[in-house]
Image (cartoon, helix red, strand yellow):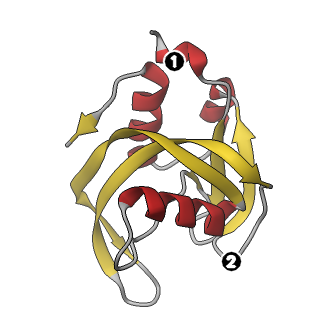
Amino acid sequence: MDRSRAVVRVRLQRRRDTGQWALSMGKMEIGETPSQCAVRETEEETGIIVEPVSMLGVYSDPGHIVAYTDGEVRQEYEVMLIARPAGGQPRANDEASDVRWVAPEELQSLDIHPTQWRQLNDYLSGAYPHID
């Protein structure tokens, strides 16, 4: 199956800290599975309730260091899941100034970090699972 043709829209959020468009992410809480974390973080950050259906991949770039204003510093390490919407409505919040569904042909017009482009390109091309 050509998964790239099945894509209708990608849900992105505009990060308040950088202004860039991004996929939902966050850190796991003690006792959570990756799927539970994805559901919780997506709802917290976007208002959308999701149902994980597959894994896109594990992504890490030792050169991508993130330093937050609160002093936290970490290296990119992301377990990316693919999910379908199961409820909720897109909404802005403390982390996201905007949340929207974006057609693949609209992505080029948005400011998206290169590490996010790797993930989006893998998803859109159907080239997964990906392990760095």
Callout 2 secondary element: loop
Residue placed under numbered mark 1 in the picture: 4
Q: CA distance from mark 1 to mark 2?
A: 32 Å
Residue 32, compared with residue 3, is above or below; it is below
Q: Mark 1–mark 2 contact, CB under 8 Å?
A: no
Asked whether 1 or 24 is in front, the reply is: 1
Residue 74 sits in which quadrant? bottom left
Give the image location of residue 102, x and y in percent: 70, 36
Identify the mark at residue 64; answer none if there is no mark: none
Asked whether 9 or 28 is in front, the reply is: 28
Q: Residue at x 19, y 43 (%)?
A: 132
Q: Residue at x 60, y 23 (%)?
A: 7
Structural crowding at the residue carrying mark 2, measured as other residues with C-alpha within 10 Å and reported as few (<14), some (14–19) or many (≥20): few
Q: Quadrant of the N terminus?
A: top left
Callout 1 secondary element: helix
Residue 39, compared with residue 95, is above or below; it is above
Residue 101, compared with residue 126, is above or below; it is below
Q: Residue placed farthest to the bottom in the image?
A: 70
Q: Residue at x 43, y 80 (%)?
A: 68
Front label number (1 vs 2):
1
Residue 18, compared with residue 86, is above or below; it is below
* Three-letter amino acid code at the position of disc 2: Asp
Residue placed under numbered mark 2 in the picture: 94
> Seen in the image, is 113 located left or right of residue 96?
left
- Residue 5 appears in the rendering: yes
Q: Residue at x 74, y 51 (%)?
A: 87
- Mark 1 and mark 2 lie on one chain; the one further toward the N terminus is 1
* Three-letter amino acid code at the position of disc 1: Ser
Give the image location of residue 9, x and y in percent: 67, 32
- Residue 15 appears in the rendering: no
Give the image location of residue 37, x and y in percent: 45, 64
